[in-house]
Image: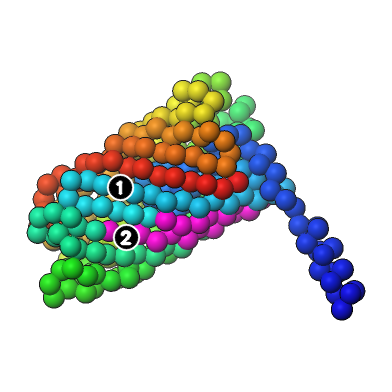
Amino acid sequence: MAIALCAGASQAADLPSPDLGKLLATGGVSQVEGAGGGGLTPWALITGYGTRDSYGANLHATAIRTQDYGLDSHGVAVGLADRVELSLARQTFRGSDGALDGLRIGQDIAGVKVRLAGDAVYEQDSWLPQIAVGAMAKRNTGVSGLAGVDNVKQLGAASDHGVDVYLSATRILLDRSLLINGTLRATRANQMGLLGFGGERGNHYQPMLEGSVAYLFSRTVVGGVEYRMKPRNLAVDREKDYYDVFVAWFPSKHVSLTAAWVALGDITVLNPTRQKGVYLSLQAGF
């Protein structure tokens, strides 16, 4: 028994400890679907502050409030050797006014991201950006608060589960305090999957462009804009593209706070007011 305990202690001692070796803010914040990046779109950067010899992890809690709806997201993400990212997130969407007052929809998301090439921080002399490929497996957990409806397929969706696949390229220009990101996502998700996947107008994967530009105003404050194209699969939902203007504060490598003004477009023909509001996200980790 003593030998086994000593062996276990030795193995634990061999595990690398988090080194927090990456530059402040280079892990990004927690994207609303759980991946490391901006608020609306993933980046090629791997979450956390662990270098290639270590690891990092974080927890996040995000709230979006528009005039008629609320979206909450919380989850966990782990970055391994600055190469692989794993994430889990749960989203809860609520109606608060109009025809969809009382509506509640849930969604679970499991994500993976792998850095394929480039290093956005340390390869400043290279033309090649950091490039990563990722996937998000999404499952809608049901609908409540809408008479006679308990599944998104009753709203016209072809399925209540699906997978998004994306390719991101991120370039950091340290001498200009600038980050530029582009993402190409293959998806058939309606409103990120909250209204299911596919529908009467289409049930095939479509390429959607997403982009971010961020500027480092000081060592701890980053501001920028994001844009995200959306498919239009449902007759009941005239889905519009998303965009936001954000500012993120990084007082240390253990915590960040992001605030944004966000526009989510129309959300179903039952409440066609264009949804604009506030986004707040807290991330804590290493």
Please give the label number shown on residue 64: 1
Q: In terms of depth relative to the viewer, which is nearer, 43 or 93?
A: 93
Visible residue check, residue 125: yes
Q: Which mark is residue 92?
A: 2
Alpha carbon distance from label 1 to label 2: 10 Å
Assess whether residue 133 is covered by the magenta stretch: no
Q: Earlier in the sequence, mark 1 or mark 2?
A: 1
Q: Is residue 230 above or below residue 38?
A: below
Which quadrant holds residue 137?
Answer: bottom left
Report x, y in % for residue 88: 47, 60
State which region is magenta: 74-93
Q: Which residue is painted at 54% across and 25% down in the image?
A: 219
218 versus 186 height, above or below = above
Between 151 and 175, the residue placed more toward the observer is 151
Is 10 situated above or below 47?
A: below
Residue name at image x 27 percent, y 50 percent: 230
Name the quadrant of the N terminus.
Answer: bottom right
Answer whether residue 89 is magenta in the image: yes
Residue at the limit of the structure toward the top, as seen here: 175
